[in-house]
Image (tube, helix red, strand yellow):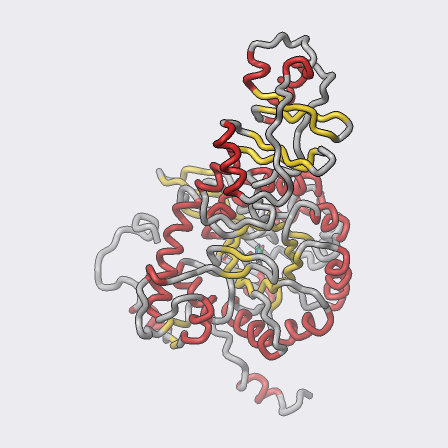
Amino acid sequence: MPEGGFRKKVMGAELALTFHDLILLPGLAVEPSEIDIRTRFTKNYSMNIPLVSSPMDTVTETEMAIAMAREGGVGVLHRNCSVEEQVEMAKKVKRAESLVIREVVTVAPDQTVGEAMKLMETHHISGLPVVKGGKLVGILTGRDVRFANPEFRVENVMTKEVVTAREGISLEEAQDLLHQHKIEKLPIVDENGNLKGLITFKDIMLRGKYPEAARDEEGQLLCAAAVSPFDLERAKKLDRYVNVLVTDVAHFHNSAVLEAAKKMVEEVEADLVVGNVGTYQAAEDVITKVEGVAGFRVGVGSGSICVTTEVTKAGSPTLYATASVADALRDYGLELPVIADGGVRGPGDIALALAAGASAVMAGNLLARCREAPGTLVSIGGRYYKQYRGMGSPSAMAKRYSLDRYSIPSKGIAEGVEGWVPYKGEVSTAVRELVLGLKASMGYAGARNIRELWEKARFAVLSPLGAQETRPHDVLLPSESERGA
Ligand code: XMP
């Protein structure tokens, strides 16, 4: 018999309010142009927009991760593939642009020009540092090989006078050197002449093209990847390439999961975001049992493709989970980011989640609509849609069980569905609209930044009838998809 009796337990149940239930009350308005939405993704990494793409196989692979980071957010690479495939995706994100390339493709002086040209073609690059025993001895550019006999040795055609720089050179200094010497590549060498990295004109140009991009300390795009908390082997293989690992389990509050996460935090260098966490008690258990966590992914069962709560009647709506976990962190004096995951339908929901204590939101549905998402583009009734499926949907699970020995089909039920979402176009377009809407929302709430939103936001509950009034009414409208809703 529960303490206080069943009646009290049932009738005194907590109200788990969701995105559908709440609105933000207007405050003393702030102009959207004065609003700063920079935020933190984890303890150690920042983003310029509070948006993260979900680790789902119809949402985040290389292209989405690159696009999200260039827009100032982050993509979390899904794990519904082999470890090698996931590592390859992470490598590609990291190689997409950087101030200093660390894994430099080089050629030896005694190789032939033909071999060097093949290397350039394979790696889509226009020049190669020439290295002998780790030391830089020359550089081979497109100009050097253009009219050279492919049989020649590299050392006979390479440029021997190489302009180099030392570790720690700033972007501006590198740019000046490239301009001054009219060169495109600047090798970084140590005091003994050993090649340590390479700065290219192309990468510097890309930085100018994406000034809002989220980057790490090396100037490379931020990259995160999902792992099962039990898959330490995968986590270790990804650790070299990603900044952040995100645990990918529907219900993190589980003794075996907590134990596994504890081990993972100790063994990896990347920041570890844990989730999905749903309640104050779960957050409390993580805080007290797993030291070194860098962020919380929160919400259970609110995702647009979820059937978890429908099937099991168990769940923790994203908004409720966000507020609960944010409270637990505050009560323990911790300033760790909360990422609200699932059910975000547009900028208003992003604003609600942030106001409820989140630092960022994770989106599946909203981003699966974009060109950069891996889902197939289909035409239905003259309109374009993209495939979108839950990672607990039968088809996604079937793929996972055939690949990943850690994903044991323990529950034996599907917790997700598969369907289509209207095609939106480029990530940059989708993000621009979300950011404009979010700033408008924060402007209404009177918040200049996310921290101010945490302090100033006031919520109000809508009745189900009242909610109808917040949508267009008493007017004949084109269908939802026609007005882009
Ligand atoms: P949205 O609403 O953005 O939600 O589509 C994306 C989030 O949903 C979670 N997810 C699932 N939840 N069954 C679930 O219960 C599933 O099959 C499933 N697949 C994804 C996940 O947290 C994701 O970020």
User: 121 left or right of 23?
Assistant: right
32 in relation to 481, above or below:
below
Q: Is residue 336 rendered to the left or right of residue 437? A: right
Ligand 1 picture quarter = bottom right
Residue 108 coordinates in the image, percent (x, y): 72, 22
**Residue 347: x %, y % from top left:** 40, 59
The structure residue drawn at horizontal position 46% and vertical position 43%, both measured from the top left corner, is 386
Q: Residue furthest left?
A: 475
Is residue 378 at all visible to an observer of this figure? Answer: yes
Residue at far bottom of view = 4
Can residue 468 be seen? no
Quarter of the figure that contains the N terminus: bottom right
Q: Position of residue 355 (x, y in %)?
A: 45, 70
Residue 60: x and y, percent?
55, 46
**Residue sitting at 40 percent across and 40 percent down?**
384
The number of numbered badges drawn on the structure is: 0
Q: Who's the residue at 57% across and 26% down the image?
A: 124
Tell me the residue at 58%/50% (across/down). 216
Residue 25, placed above or below residue 301: below
In which image quadrant can residue 403 be found? top right
**Quadrant of the rendering where the C terminus is positioned:** bottom left
- In this picture, residue 409 sits left or right of residue 373: right
